[in-house]
Amino acid sequence: MVVATPGLVKLRKHQFARQTTFNTPVAAVRAYPFSGTPTIDLAWTDSEGDLGSVDIIAAPTRGPEELTASLTQDRLYYNDLVLQLSAMFGDDVDAVGAGTGKTWTHQPASLTADDLDIYTYEFGDDLDGTGGKPNDWFQLGDGLLESWTVNGLEGLGALTTDMSWRFGMARYEGATEAALQPSPAVPTAALTVDNAGVPVYLGDAVLSIDSAHGSIGTTPISDALHSFSMNVSHALDLKRLANGNGFDISGYTRGARIIELTLQFAKTADTVGVGSESDAWFSETAVNRFVEIEFTSSAVAETGSPDIPYSWQLRMPLRYYTRTDGAIGGNTTVTLVGRAFYHATLGYAFKSVLVNTLATATL
């Protein structure tokens, strides 16, 4: 019998759990169908001093770690959204609902800074220390999203996401030094990706754009949206304080947040010409638009009278910044890019209402 070479790409796993305390990782509780790898830069650098040699003599030293992960999800599922919304917006949101259908409302504050939700991330493959194999797993703690992009691609299929994670600490199961080994040990066993996830389809979306905040969600833009992309990013100030924890980050401070929406349209009376979205862009003063994108699945999160479907509603006041012309197949298109802004009467710049069957954000 020939034993297969270990370290299979398809046996990589991405496992997460939400932490309650900074610098205190926890065992993962859910596996996700992500792709990508973490980047663990320990900042080893050489001395710039005069060493009496044209070659390196002095040992390098470590510096401020850069711990990141660029991960993607090529099929977005309703139950997987909680992790991403929580890691992006924070504020310790809990689900509401006594039945199987759970409602998650994220309405991040603009005039104050919400608390951060941080996560432990376990990454590795089939080298897990079992069956005589070595263990090559990492545990990254104090994780949150620096940027998050949701894509609805041409073709009306499942949405995709791109995630830029930032972490504050790293441990390695293969480390000799006890202080650098994960605690609790990784990988957390018996976690598998959900095999019955309900996908979020662009084909289930209805886009509405209104002129008044009180009418948000009431004016559908029909037969016009080809694709969209929503990117959320915020600047983070990394606090590095000497406290006996080596190179672990001591905390984060939020900076400015930008929520940008890109909409690719067919050319219709709603999107070009007088009174259209292009007209709102081509103005001497910024024109306020009030956008809602609502996805409603045919799958049921809770059976009842009536049934409660899986759904996701996004709302934001928006102002357009750029327009570009393009084409899909034999037809021309127009793409408008806008940014969300804080609207005092609505009380938010962004609001997400998600209905799924996930009961707790610790997942």
Image: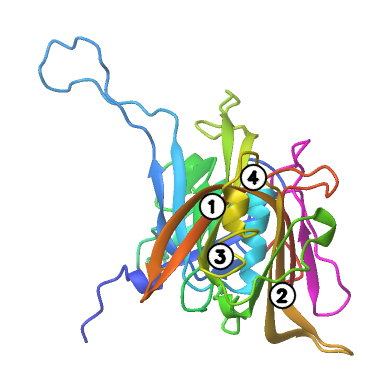
Q: Residue furthest front?
A: 274
Mark 4 vs mark 2: which is more N-terminal?
4
Residue 188 — which label?
3
Q: Residues within 10 Å of mark 3 (few under 14, many from 20)?
A: some
Amino acid of disc 1 = Val
Q: Residues within 10 Å of mark 1 (few under 14, many from 20)?
A: many
Stretch of the chain drawn in magenta: 90-117
> Where does the C terminus fall, quadrant-wise?
bottom right
Amino acid of disc 4 = Thr
Residue 24 — which label?
4
Give the CA distance from mark 3 to mark 4. 16 Å
In the rendered image of this protein, does residue 159 appear above or below residue 307? above
Residue 311 — which label?
2
> Which marked residue is nearer to the observer: mark 4 or mark 2?
2
Left or right of 171? Residue 131 is left
Residue at the spot x=78%, y=48% of the render?
348
Left or right of 92? Residue 82 is left
Q: Nearer the viewer, residue 8 or 286?
A: 286
Give the CA distance from mark 4 to mark 1. 40 Å
Residue 170, given in percent of the width and then of the height, sits at 49, 44
**Most common secondary structure along the magenta stretch:** loop
Amino acid of disc 3 = Thr
Mark 3 vs mark 4: which is more N-terminal?
4
Mark 2 vs mark 1: which is more N-terminal?
2
Mark 1 vs mark 3: which is more N-terminal?
3
Please name the residue that numbered disc 1 is placed on.
Answer: 337
